[in-house]
Image: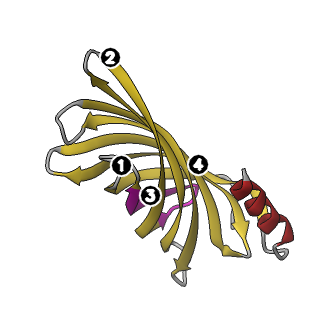
Amino acid sequence: MMVVLFGLALVISAPTHAGIGLYNIGPRVGKDVVQGDDTRTLWLVKADIATLFSPKVLLEVSGETGSGRDLGGRDVDVVGGSTIFKYYWVNRRKTAYAFTGGGLGVNRYRRFEAGAFRDQLDTSIHFVLLGMERHLEKLKGVFEVRWLLGNIEGATSLRVTLGISYKLRLL
C-alpha cells in the first residue's frame, strides 16, 4: 500500500510532462528459464499507463499467466502481475526505441504435491536488461529480456518476451 501511495505522490508532484492515461496495450508471449528443464511459458498483457518526469519515463503494468515444470519435475501454474518503470532511448525518426528499467511483481505459484494443490505467494524484483520496440503507425513490435529475482524455489528466472502493442495515445 505504501508503494502505491508513494507512486501516486510522484505522479501528482511531477512536472507538467507527466500524465496518466492509457498510452498503449498489447499481448505478449514469453518464456521463463530457471535452469535446465525448469521453464515456464507465459501469456502476458502489458499496458503503459503513465509518463513520469518526462515522456522518456513510462510506468508499465502487466498481468500474466503461465505454466511449466519446476526443478522437481512437478507441474506448476503461475498467475501474477508487475509494475515496471521504463526509461526509453529514441532514434531520430522516432521509429525504434530501446528501453531498460525495473520494478516489482507478485506471483502465485500452484504446484500439485502429495495428492493436493499447494499455493505459494511470492514477491519479486524485476530488472529489464534490454527492451526494444519498432514502431509502425498504430502498432509496435516489442522484444524484452528481463531478470526476475524471487524468494521461493523456481521464482528467480531469466524471462524473454515477444509481442505487439496497440498505440492509443502519442507520447
Dot 3 or dot 4, earlier in sequence:
4
Mark 2 to mark 3 CA distance (whole Å) = 41 Å
Type of amino acid at the residue the image marks with label 4 = Ile
- Name the residue rendered at 69%, 67% in the picture: 171
**Residue placed most toward the observer, 88 or 133:** 88
Outermost residue toward the top in this view? 115
Residue to which mark 4 is pinned = 25
Name the front one of labels 1 and 4: 1
Mark 2 to mark 4 CA distance (whole Å) = 37 Å
Residue to which mark 3 is pinned = 141
Disc 3 on helix, strand or loop? strand
Type of amino acid at the residue the image marks with label 3 = Gly
Dot 1 or dot 4, earlier in sequence:
4
Within-10-Å neighbours for mark 3: few <14, some 14–19, many 20+: some
The vertical placement of 77 against 157, above or below, is above
Dot 3 or dot 1, earlier in sequence:
3
Dot 2 or dot 3, earlier in sequence:
2
Type of amino acid at the residue the image marks with label 2 = Ala
Q: Please provide percent x and percent y for residue 128.
A: 44, 66
Mark 2 to mark 1 CA distance (whole Å) = 21 Å
- Name the residue rendered at 51%, 70% in the picture: 101
Within-10-Å neighbours for mark 2: few <14, some 14–19, many 20+: few
Residue to which mark 1 is pinned = 155
Residue to which mark 2 is pinned = 116
- Residues in magenta? 134-149
Name the front one of labels 2 and 1: 2
Name the front one of labels 3 and 1: 1
Dot 2 or dot 4, earlier in sequence:
4
Whether pointer 1 and pointer 4 mark residues with C-beta atoms closer than 8 Å, the reply is: no
**Residue placed most toward the observer, 58 or 9:** 9
